[in-house]
Image: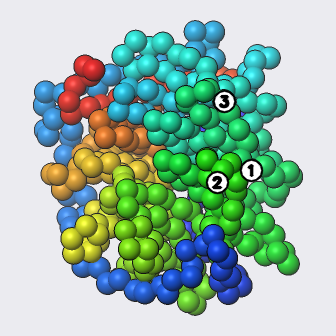
């Protein structure tokens, strides 16, 4: 059965032990890394600020569609665009190969963009106006991860990277998509230890080069690139920020917490973390650097978790906890969009929409049996916009 979502906890980026940083001409590591101190805003993070979405957005609506192709095959959502394109993947089923599809939010029509070989499933996915980029793999035991790019102008797909027969947990090809280049993190075994690096693929030259050693999980913003590296003690991760305006590189100091997963809306960075003094306390924070660098802790939990957070100018969404909770940046409140299924859905964001899913088959046993047959749970997709659902 298709993995509902893969879980990358902090441990995947505790890139220990690692050799000292090596530098190449392609790497930004020729600059000295300095530390940037950030102002800390603890925010209202105890859950008392949770409000139902109707209290803040009374005149808006939520549109629900079923994630199912006309031939009956279910698919799972990957992303949503401001144009109302819902990208998804239908796993191989009933003799038909897996397909990357785009579903029109307004018409419900779907089109096939790419046909996967064998039993590959799409894991990480990014897009812009010109390209789609994703990683795919067969399974998590001895998979063969691939990085692919689809040119939306000529509708051609190219394989950027491929590995054969890697052990689980050693190579998660996480990606970041720029206008004319792609970054992805990869790893391999070196003396039976994981060794991480970030690679770069140039769409013009069609060449792949080393971007940075001992680094993982790149993100690309409007004027910056950021990634994770091990700290000096080789115990935890820290965020490295490459300012593309002046080409400086600095470490973002995150007082009181060790950072984990990171994402960006182009200007701000959202990141997960856990307390340096209380490891059982998990944190979700936003880093902003346009004026005075500051970090705002927007949520914290001892029992919940923050899987795969995403950020947009309006919201921060994540997977974790029993409720579907989304942080409204303007209102500085956590908004409840659904009272259940928060532990089985990621919240996908773009500038205009936010999206989550719930099981279309409400009986848990029936849903599981059907998912075993079809390799994915049949889901209802729920799409919300403050601007309404008109184009």
Residue furthest bottom in the image: 233
Left/right of residue 11 with respect to residue 108 in the rendered view: right
Judge the density around disc 1: few (<14), some (14-19), many (≥20) Cα neighbours within 10 Å.
Answer: some
Q: Which mark is residue 201?
A: 2
Q: Are marks 2 and 1 in contact (CB under 8 Å)?
A: yes
Q: Residue 391 occupies which quadrant of the picture?
A: top left
Judge the density around disc 3: few (<14), some (14-19), many (≥20) Cα neighbours within 10 Å.
Answer: few
Q: Is residue 247 above or below residue 320?
A: below
Residue 79 in percent (x, y) is at 47, 36
Residue at image position (38%, 61%) is: 223
Q: Nearer the viewer, residue 283 or 126?
A: 126
Residue furthest front in the image: 205
Residue 292 in percent (x, y) is at 21, 75
Marks 3 and 1, how far apart at CA: 16 Å
Residue 373 in percent (x, y) is at 72, 23
- Of labels 3 and 1, earlier in sequence is 3
At mark 3, the secondary structure is strand
Q: Residue 167 occupies which quadrant of the picture?
A: bottom right
Marks 2 and 3, how far apart at CA: 16 Å
Residue 236 in percent (x, y) is at 55, 79
Q: Which residue is mark 1?
A: 161
| Marks 3, 1: nearer the viewer | 3
Q: Which mark is residue 264?
A: none
């Amino acid at each position: 059965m298709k993995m509902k979502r893969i879980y990358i906890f902090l441990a995947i980026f505790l890139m220990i032990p690692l050799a000292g940083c090596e530098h190449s001409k392609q790497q930004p590591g020729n600059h000295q890394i300095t530390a940037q101190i950030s102002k800390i805003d603890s925010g209202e993070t105890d859950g008392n600020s949770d409000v139902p979405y109707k209290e803040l957005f009374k005149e808006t609506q939520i549109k629900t569609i079923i994630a199912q192709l006309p031939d009956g095959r279910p698919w799972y959502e990957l992303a949503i665009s401001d144009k109302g394109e819902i990208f998804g993947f239908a796993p191989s089923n009933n003799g038909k190969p897996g397909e990357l599809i785009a579903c029109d939010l307004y018409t419900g029509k779907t089109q096939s963009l790419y046909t996967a070989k064998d039993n590959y499933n799409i894991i990480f996915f990014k897009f812009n106006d010109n390209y789609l980029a994703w990683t795919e793999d067969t399974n998590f035991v001895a998979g063969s991860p691939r990085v692919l790019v689809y040119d939306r102008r000529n509708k051609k797909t190219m394989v950027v990277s491929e590995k054969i027969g890697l052990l689980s947990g050693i190579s998660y090809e996480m990606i970041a998509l720029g206008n004319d280049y792609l970054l992805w993190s990869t790893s391999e075994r070196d003396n039976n230890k994981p060794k991480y690096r970030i690679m770069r693929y140039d769409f013009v030259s069609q060449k792949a080069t080393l971007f940075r050693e001992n680094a993982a999980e790149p993100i690309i913003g409007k004027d910056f690139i950021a990634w994770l590296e091990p700290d000096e003690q080789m115990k935890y991760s820290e965020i490295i920020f490459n300012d593309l305006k002046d080409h400086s590189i600095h470490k973002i100091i995150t007082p009181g917490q060790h950072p984990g997963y990171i994402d960006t809306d182009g200007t701000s960075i959202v990141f997960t973390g856990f307390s340096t003094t209380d490891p059982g306390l998990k944190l979700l924070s936003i880093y902003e650097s346009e004026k005075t660098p500051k970090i705002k802790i927007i949520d914290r939990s001892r029992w919940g978790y923050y899987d795969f957070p995403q950020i947009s100018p309006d919201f921060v969404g994540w997977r974790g906890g029993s409720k579907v909770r989304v942080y409204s940046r303007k209102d500085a409140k956590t908004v409840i969009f659904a009272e259940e299924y928060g532990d089985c859905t990621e919240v996908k964001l773009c500038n205009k929409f936010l999206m989550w899913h719930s099981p279309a088959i409400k009986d848990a046993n029936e849903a599981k049996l059907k998912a075993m047959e079809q390799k994915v749970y049949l889901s209802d997709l729920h799409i919300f916009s403050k601007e309404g659902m008109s184009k």
